[in-house]
Image: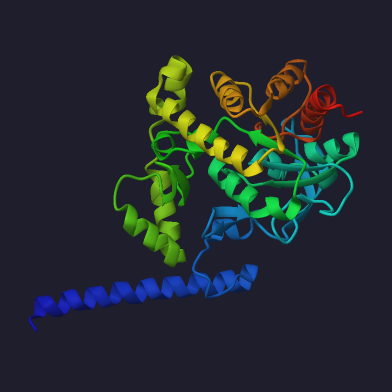
């Protein structure tokens, strides 16, 4: 073996040793710090202590048995106490499946995960009290419509709900399309399932070495971190976010149009899976053209659509009410109450609730 070959071999061995040391060190640290299983491949430190965990099937999911008791802040900096509890399946609320009450299953993203408020202050907890219904609620931050459908599919036969309440969010469109997410300001940059040409495919919103990234992030915590950081580093320049183009061109934007079709197809699957069970939907936002798109998707699939939830939040904010948490995106206690009041009013008007 020549000296050049020996040197190359030594470099490769050194890199492999450093990688192995880094991988083992991370796993030991996760085990000590968060009691994470040492041999589980799927995991990364930024998710170990948050109310989400990485999932082989879903990309990520609401963390089972997550609890938090402490303080949160509203957008004006005011402090309030919260008590947050998830069950063993990541549900924020899981009622009695044998109840004689009407059972309402609530599915959504971070708006429904609702880590900004206590268990009894969420919009669906208030809904349950005001309408005297049994509530089951699952939400997870940054979930797309397909991930939400997969949760529905897993638990519907256990819960057997009488009504499905579906929470939309305008970033569902970026979460549902790889092409959209690559150009979005809401880009997650993680491996997740997408609905592509009528089937589920696992992708990362990147252009190069996709198969290598998927293999690496599914089998190494160290590589997961490195690729995730790289994906975020490659986020589009702020001047080229697709949301700005959509705001100017609306439905004529082709990428947005494709994402609407994808979302419509998934909601058609939701409708089919629910059989004859009533579905009610609403959007957490009121911005154009996303609200109109959700309205059309709901109408296409014979789904009830409450169109005033986001507008009610905006109206309250314009009067000076503090309706959002410190991130100025998610609802605080008052925000959740406003959302609950809109839904309760719709249910009473359209379904005969008292």
- Residue at 57%, 30% (x, y): give it: 170
Residue 296 visible from this viewpoint: yes
Name the colouring of the figure. Answer: rainbow
Q: From the viewer's perspective, is residue 309 above or below residue 275? A: above
Task: Measuring from the top left, give residue 221's x and y in whole percent.
Answer: 47, 65
Task: Measuring from the top left, give residue 14's x and y in whole percent.
Answer: 29, 76
Q: Nearer the viewer, residue 217 or 167?
A: 167
- Residue at 57%, 69% (x, y): give it: 30
Q: Nearer the viewer, residue 263 or 17?
A: 263
Q: Is residue 112 left or right of residue 182?
A: right
- Residue at 86%, 26% (x, y): give it: 352
- Quadrant housing the C terminus: top right
Q: How many marks?
A: 0
Q: Quadrant of residue 134?
A: top right
Residue lying furthest left in this view? 2
Q: Nearer the viewer, residue 168 or 27?
A: 168
Residue 186 visible from this viewpoint: no
Task: Measuring from the top left, give residue 161's x and y in whole percent.
Answer: 76, 45
Q: Is residue 239 left or right of residue 155?
A: left
Q: Quadrant of residue 213?
A: bottom left
Residue lying furthest front in this view? 276
Q: Is residue 28 left or right of residue 151?
A: left
Task: Measuring from the top left, give residue 101's x and y in whole percent.
Answer: 88, 44
Q: From the viewer's perspective, is residue 123 above or below residue 220? A: above
- Residue at 47%, 75% (x, y): give it: 24
- Quadrant housing the N terminus: bottom left
Q: From the viewer's perspective, is residue 150 above or below residue 39? A: above
């Amino acid at each position: 073996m020549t000296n050049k070959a020996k040197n190359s071999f030594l470099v490769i061995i050194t890199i492999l040793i450093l990688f192995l040391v880094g991988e083992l060190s991370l796993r030991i640290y996760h085990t000590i710090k968060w009691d994470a299983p040492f041999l589980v491949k799927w995991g990364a430190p930024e998710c170990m202590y948050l109310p989400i965990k990485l999932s082989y099937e879903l990309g990520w999911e609401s963390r089972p048995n997550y609890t938090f008791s402490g303080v949160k802040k509203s957008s004006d900096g005011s402090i309030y106490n919260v008590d947050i509890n998830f069950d063993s399946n990541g549900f924020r609320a899981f009622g009695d499946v044998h109840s004689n009450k009407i059972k309402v299953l609530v599915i959504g993203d971070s708006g429904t995960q609702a880590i900004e408020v206590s268990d009894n202050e969420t919009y669906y907890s208030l809904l349950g009290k005001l309408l005297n219904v049994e509530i089951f609620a699952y939400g997870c931050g940054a979930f797309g419509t397909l991930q939400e459908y997969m949760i529905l599919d897993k638990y519907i036969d256990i819960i057997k709900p009488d009504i499905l309440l579906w929470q939309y969010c305008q970033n569902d469109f970026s979460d549902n399309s790889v092409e959209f997410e690559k150009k979005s300001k809401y880009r997650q940059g993680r491996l997740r399932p997408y609905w592509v040409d009528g089937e589920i495919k696992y992708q990362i919103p990147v252009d190069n070495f996709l198969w290598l990234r998927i293999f690496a992030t599914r089998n190494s915590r160290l590589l997961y971190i490195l690729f995730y950081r790289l994906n975020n580093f490659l986020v589009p320049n702020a001047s080229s976010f697709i949301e700005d183009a959509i705001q100017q061109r609306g439905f004529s934007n082709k990428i947005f149009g494709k994402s609407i079709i994808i979302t419509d197809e998934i909601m058609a699957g939701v409708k089919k899976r629910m059989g004859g069970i009533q579905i009610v939907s609403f959007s957490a936002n009121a911005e154009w053209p996303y609200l109109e798109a959700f309205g059309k998707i709901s109408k296409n699939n014979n789904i009830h659509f409450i169109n005033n939830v986001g507008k009610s939040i905006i109206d309250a904010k314009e009067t000076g009410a503090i309706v959002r948490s410190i991130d100025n995106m998610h609802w605080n206690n008052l925000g959740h109450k406003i959302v609950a009041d809109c839904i309760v009013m719709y249910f009473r008007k359209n379904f005969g609730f008292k």
